[in-house]
Image (cartoon, helix red, strand yellow):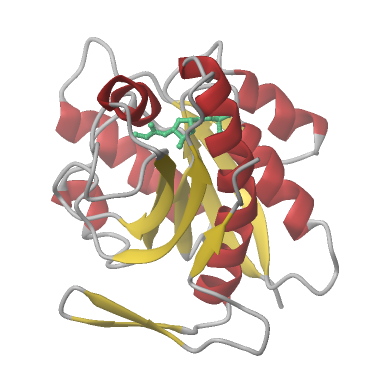
């Protein structure tokens, strides 16, 4: 049986798309049971609907964080999900949510953490003039992008890149990383020792990916 997963998002949902595409393979160990957005206009909700996956909009505005997160927890528990993937979810989660899914909430961040946490990781990297940029999949803790790291992918930041060109190159790397990490999670191959994540890798798998320059 496939492991039931919930997805949280706020925007376009290209990472959701990458996860849904992976889940469509019969041999993939996870299935997405519920997609929740805090924004009604998130195109990610439409992507889920097109794939026949149940969706919910849970607005965060005009209410307490505790109230907002309690509704998220109730919806995901009602759907029976075991893992949560944040895929462009632009709200911080507190222990009120995280304790309901202990060490079972994944996030993808558009930078090589611990560099450039928080908003606009790609823009921060571009503004800093880095030569290597990338993305990180990590377990979510109560900090902002501070949780234990599963895998990272590095891409070149080229002199001719504007912020958007760099963002697109990072995004393509995100789409490779996230399905890989979800597979490890769903197959129970992740073990946490302090801040170190141990992953039982199969031949051909890697914890770090590179895209060569030029
Ligand atoms: C992605 O680049 C993701 O890494 C980033 O938002 C984008 C969502 O794109 N997430 C964060 O910045 C979280 N702090 P998508 O909606 O096309 O998947």
Q: In the visual, does 159 lie left or right of 92?
A: right
List x then y, in percent, for residue 13. Answer: 60, 30
List x then y, in percent, for residue 8. Answer: 46, 39
**Measuring 64% from the left and 53% from the top, which residue is drawn there?**
176
Observer-nearest of 62 and 125: 125
List x then y, in percent, for residue 141. Answer: 20, 55
Name the image quarter holding residue 67.
top left
List x then y, in percent, for residue 1. Answer: 71, 78
Is 72 situated above or below 30?
A: above
**Measuring 19% from the left and 52% from the top, which residue is drawn there?**
146
Position of the C terminus by quadrant: top right
Q: In the visual, does 1 lie left or right of 208?
A: right
**Measuring 17% from the left and 44% from the top, which residue is drawn there?**
94
Is 96 situated above or below 105?
A: above
Is 36 situated above or below 18?
A: above
Observer-nearest of 127 and 173: 127
């Amino acid at each position: 049986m496939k492991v039931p997963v919930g997805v949280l998002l706020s925007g376009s949902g290209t990472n959701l798309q990458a996860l849904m595409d992976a889940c469509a393979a019969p041999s993939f160990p996870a299935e997405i049971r519920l997609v929740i957005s805090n924004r009604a206009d998130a195109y990610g909700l439409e992507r889920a609907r097109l794939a026949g996956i149940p969706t919910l909009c849970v607005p965060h505005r005009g209410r307490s964080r505790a109230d907002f997160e309690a509704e998220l927890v109730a919806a995901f528990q009602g759907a029976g999900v075991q893992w949560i993937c944040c895929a462009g979810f632009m709200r911080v989660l507190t222990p009120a949510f995280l304790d309901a899914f202990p060490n079972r909430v994944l996030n993808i961040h558009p930078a090589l953490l611990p560099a450039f946490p928080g908003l606009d990781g790609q823009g921060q990297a571009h503004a800093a003039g880095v030569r290597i940029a990338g993305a990180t999949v990590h377990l979510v803790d109560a900090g902002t992008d501070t949780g234990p790291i599963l895998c990272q992918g590095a891409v070149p930041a080229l002199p001719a890149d504007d912020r958007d060109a760099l963002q697109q190159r990072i995004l393509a790397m995100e789409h490779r990383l996230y399905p890989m990490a979800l597979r490890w999670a769903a197959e129970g191959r992740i073990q946490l020792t302090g801040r170190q994540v141990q992953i039982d890798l199969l031949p051909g798998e890697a914890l770090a990916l590179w895209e060569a320059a030029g």
